Structure formats: structure tokens, C-alpha cells
Amino acid sequence: MPNTITDPSARSSLSFRILLLTPKAERRWGTMTAGQMLRHVAVGMEQGLGRCPDPDASNLLMRTAVKGLVLRVLPKFPRGLPTSKAMSQTGIVADPAEFDASRDEVLALLEECGAWPPDRSMPNHPAFGPLNHVERGILTWKHLDHHLRQFGV
């Protein structure tokens, strides 16, 4: 079974890696700072909880082939994938003084999302449309893993 945030041990491993992140961590690719990345993944989890609306801009190709590829075939996210407007951190300056609070928020959201009841209704994903509980857990794990690898943790 693929890694998912609904698995306590996979979630614990992500939490450990998040705790290793520092405000001065250098990115290996992309343009975000470590602080911006924390905000980015927090918004993604808020979207999954239905608290940060992000319009479904999916199409048939994204809802079928690309979603299946990302969830079931690729072991990790490829670099350079576009993000939705709601999750974009372009032009947003992350205050280093708020880094610890942002990291704590991500850790709390990770626990909250990991405790999704299996019958919970999931809001549509902006790129992949409808996702069930299992798909959302896998996608969230892959998203966090992608950005933690981006900063070497």
C-alpha cells in the first residue's frame, strides 16, 4: 500500500521531517523559501478540510489519466508542477519570526487531516476533481514528501 497520511507511522515520519526543517533551509529546486513552503502545504491541507475554497479546475484528462498516474504509478511528485492560485506563495513574504508558528500549524493540520473519518465527504481537488478518503490521504502524503525533499529533509 502506498504511503498515506491516514497511516500513523507514515504521518509520524512526516512530522519528524517537518521538525527538522529550519527557516534557513535551502531549496534544491523551485522558488519558495522554507517559510513559504510551510504556508503552501498548510493551504493545501486546509483545502482538503474544506476550509480554503479552491475551485475545481480539473478536466477529463486530469481527473482520469493524470490523477491515476500521480496516485498509483509515480512514487513521488515530479518537479515543476503548477499550483492553484489559492496555494501559490508567489509574492508573499514569509516572516522568519513566524516560522515556528507556521511549522506548528502544519503539524496540527497533518494530525487533523490524518484523522479524517473514512466516510467524510471530501471537497473536490482543484486539479484532480473528486477524491475519496484514500486518494486524499495518498495525495497529501506525496505533496508533503515532495516539498520536504525540496528542502532536503
Image (tube, helix red, strand yellow):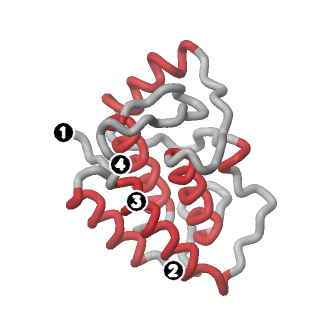
| Mark 3–mark 4 CB contact (< 8 Å) | no
What number is the disc on residue 81? none
What number is the disc on residue 22? 2
Residue at position x 40%, y 68% in the image:
153
**Residue highlighted by disc 4:** 116
- The single residue placed furthest to the top in the displayed view is 60
Looking at numbered disc 4 in the image, what kind of residue is underneath it? Trp
Location of residue 34 by image quarter: bottom right
Q: Secondary structure at mark 2?
A: loop
Sequence-first disc among 2 and 1 = 1
Nearer to us of marks 4 and 1 is: 4
Looking at numbered disc 2 in the image, what kind of residue is underneath it? Thr
Q: CA distance from mark 4 to mark 1?
A: 18 Å
Residue 21 at x, y percent in the picture? 46, 75
Q: CA distance from mark 2 to mark 3?
A: 23 Å
Q: Secondary structure at mark 3?
A: helix
129, above or below 142, in the image? above
**Residues packed near mark 3 inside 10 Å, few (<14), some (14 to 19) or many (20 plus):** some
**Residue highlighted by disc 3:** 112
Residue 131 at x, y percent in the picture? 43, 30
Residue 113 at x, y percent in the picture? 40, 54
Residue at position x 62%, y 71% in the image:
35
Q: CA distance from mark 2 to mark 1?
A: 31 Å
Depth check, front residue: 88 or 55? 55
Sequence-first disc among 4 and 1 = 1
**Residue highlighted by disc 1:** 1
Q: From the viewer's perspective, tell me whether residue 23 is left or right of residue 13.
A: right
Nearer to us of marks 2 and 3 is: 3
Sequence-first disc among 1 and 3 = 1
Q: CA distance from mark 3 to mark 4?
A: 7 Å
| Mark 2–mark 4 CB contact (< 8 Å) | no
